[in-house]
Image: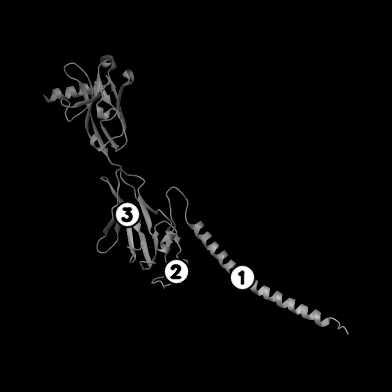
Amino acid sequence: MRVLYLLLLCETSVQLQCDKTVIQANVGSGFSLFCQYQTNRYLFSKKYWCRGESRSTCVILMDSDHLTNRELRHRSQIIDAQRRGLVIIMTDLKLEDTGVYWVGIDKIYADIMTSINLIVTFVAVSKPMVWPLSSMGDTCWGQPVTVHCASAQGTSVQYTWYQSTQPQDIQFQSSADLHLHCGIVEEDSQYYCTASNDVSSQHSGMVSLQVLKPSEEDCIYSFAMEGQRSYDCSDRLKTSTSTPLRSTGHLTEEPYQPGTNSNLSSTVNQTHQDRHYSRAWALLPVWYEVLRWLFLATLIAAVCLVHKCRPTQV
């Protein structure tokens, strides 16, 4: 019996051969399977694609007579190119597509069949990047700021923000966005984002938050992220009515958007220039007053001199 099975398998492999027997693909992708068969014997025979652990119980999903399962109608195709071979195409793969398939040729008494093992997996996530969705300078004025987390690669990725604490990190927010505002920034802290799916898990660099003035009504805080430049809150600290509890040795970075070169450096420089000009214009009236009084004194002196030098009439 075993010898008969081996002979049958050998005969099948000669009559029908495919370029691969194991296909590994990611969710959302597709594949093309190319097979050759004996055209002199099976040129006009029906070819089919079926699914099942056993060749005797597999369910036909589509065939060369244009019969196609409803669920696969828009993402699968079987092409009998005759002497150029047989092509099986599947697109938009799903996890549930994983399983054993068969390429078959209809034949009296015993179909010619070869098995194909399809393995569909998620795309592994890449290290997530973090960047602010608004100006990081808003933190200097106690305004809320949102930090976004995203991975460039990955299928069905879930994002979670954690706060770095001892002895164990705690889950902070279950979303891709970290919302920072005066109500929660009571002390210095660090946060990081994790991106995960069924294949892998990665975490971002640290987002370090520093509280410069812990006040619910007029708080000042800053935060820094790896790979980004800092934002200076010194002007805000100088104009604050109360003395800050801490000085800013490390200041927050400028906002960053992936794929662009935009940052806040030009905005910050422009703001400093505007303040410089505003101070200069604020001093202009003082010099104007001095010049006006000097001009008036000179005018009075000239009038007195002219009056004194004028000859007296008898």
Q: Are dots 3 and 1 in contact, CB under 8 Å? A: no
Q: Earlier in the sequence, mark 3 or mark 1?
A: 3
Q: Amino acid at mark 3?
A: Cys
Q: Residue at x 32, y 18 (%)?
A: 83
Please identify, in this view, whether the residue under mark 3 or under mark 1 is nearer the observer: 1
Query: As rendered, which of 307 and 42 lies closer to the eye?
Result: 307
Q: Which residue is mark 1?
A: 285
Q: Residue at x 26, y 15 (%)?
A: 41
Q: Is residue 192 left or right of residue 240?
A: left
Q: CA distance from mark 3 to mark 1?
A: 54 Å
Question: SS class of the residue under badge 2?
Answer: helix
Q: Earlier in the sequence, mark 3 or mark 2?
A: 3
Q: Is residue 92 left or right of residue 281?
A: left
Q: Which residue is mark 2?
A: 237
Residue 24 lies, with reference to residue 245, above or below; the image says: above
Figure quadrant of residue 191: bottom left
Q: Is residue 7 left or right of residue 238?
A: left
Residue 284 lies, with reference to residue 125, above or below; the image says: below
Query: The N terminus appears in which quarter of the rendering?
Result: top left
**Residue 237 screen position, x and y as percent:** 44, 69
Q: Which residue is mark 3?
A: 193
Residue 71 lies, with reference to residue 204, above or below; the image says: above
Q: Earlier in the sequence, mark 2 or mark 1?
A: 2
Query: As rendered, which of 64 and 109 lies closer to the eye?
Result: 64
Figure quadrant of residue 3: top left
Q: Residue at x 14, y 22 (%)?
A: 4
What's the mark number on residue 44?
none
